[in-house]
Amino acid sequence: DAEITQSPRHKITETGRQVTLACHQTWNHNNMFWYRQDLGHGLRLIHYSYGVHDTNKGEVSDGYSVSRSNTEDLPLTLESAASSQTSVYFCASSASGTANEKLFFGSGTQLSVL
Amino acid sequence: SQQGEEDPQALSIQEGENATMNCSYKTSINNLQWYRQNSGRGLVHLILIRSNEREKHSGRLRVTLDTSKKSSSLLITASRAADTASYFCATDGGNNNDMRFGAGTRLTVKP
């Protein structure tokens, strides 16, 4: 069955370190998204991509970057981790086009920046 | 900024009762979606309603959309303990090509 997987499930890092969170989907979806979830804020969009070599900034993109070299993967990089980036990160994907069809979510990565 | 806002923030009911959650949004939309999240898990899509639709059903779920009031409601009928979860609405903001989520409603169904 097609799926979307995130790794690692849990990550502890130190302030200032570079961290990369992986997201891999086998739906063959063109659209991929990264969200962070914090208490009281729901999910906030970090970056998104509509296809290979396409990336776009979301509402909370500062301090984060993504790259899309193939259809299946959209890794999220924290350039220099900050304590404010402690959060749960979710990757999601959806079918082709920009019709805002339903999103399929991964199980999340709990990141702690100490 | 968040596009949708759910109300109430938390809801506690007895098994068998109906649960109603509301979502308000700020700008015009193409569609509105509802998602469910069990504790410690990713979100799961429940239902999508387009801007030209007023009501949609899926099993025990009923969603309504009032574009004039910029609001939607999710009704879960005959609730079960297994319905305990957080429920989120998401909208596309009209011209935005991405989905924005509210802070969610935490539903607790007591057996």
Image: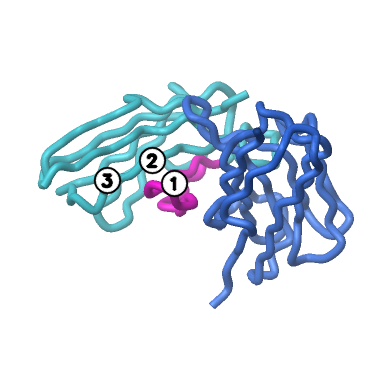
Query: Which residues, given as a range, are shown in magenta?
Result: B31-50
Percent x, y of residue A3: 57, 69
The residue that mark 1 highlights is B35
Estimate how packed mark 1 is, as few (under 14), some (14 to 19) or many (20 or more) residues with alpha carbons within 10 Å.
many
| Quarter of the view holding residue A68 | bottom right
Estimate how packed mark 2 is, as few (under 14), some (14 to 19) or many (20 or more) residues with alpha carbons within 10 Å.
many
- The quarter of the rendered structure image containing the C terminus of chain A is top right
The residue that mark 3 highlights is B84
Is residue A105 visible to the viewer in this orientation of the structure?
yes
Estimate how packed mark 3 is, as few (under 14), some (14 to 19) or many (20 or more) residues with alpha carbons within 10 Å.
many
Q: Is residue B4 above or below residue B54?
A: above
* Mark 3 residue type: Thr
Percent x, y of residue B109: 19, 42
Q: Is residue A94 above or below residue A46?
A: below
Which residue is pictured at 83% across the width and 39% down the height?
Answer: A79
Asked which secondary structure carries label 1, the reply is: strand
Q: Colour of chain A?
A: blue
Tag in front: 1 or 3: 3
**Residue B81 relative to residue B64: left or right:** left
Q: Colour of chain B?
A: cyan
* Mark 2 residue type: Tyr
Badge 1 vs badge 2, beta-carbon distance below 8 Å: yes
Which residue is pictured at 81% across the width and 57% down the height?
Answer: A51
**Residue B63 relative to residue A97: left or right:** left
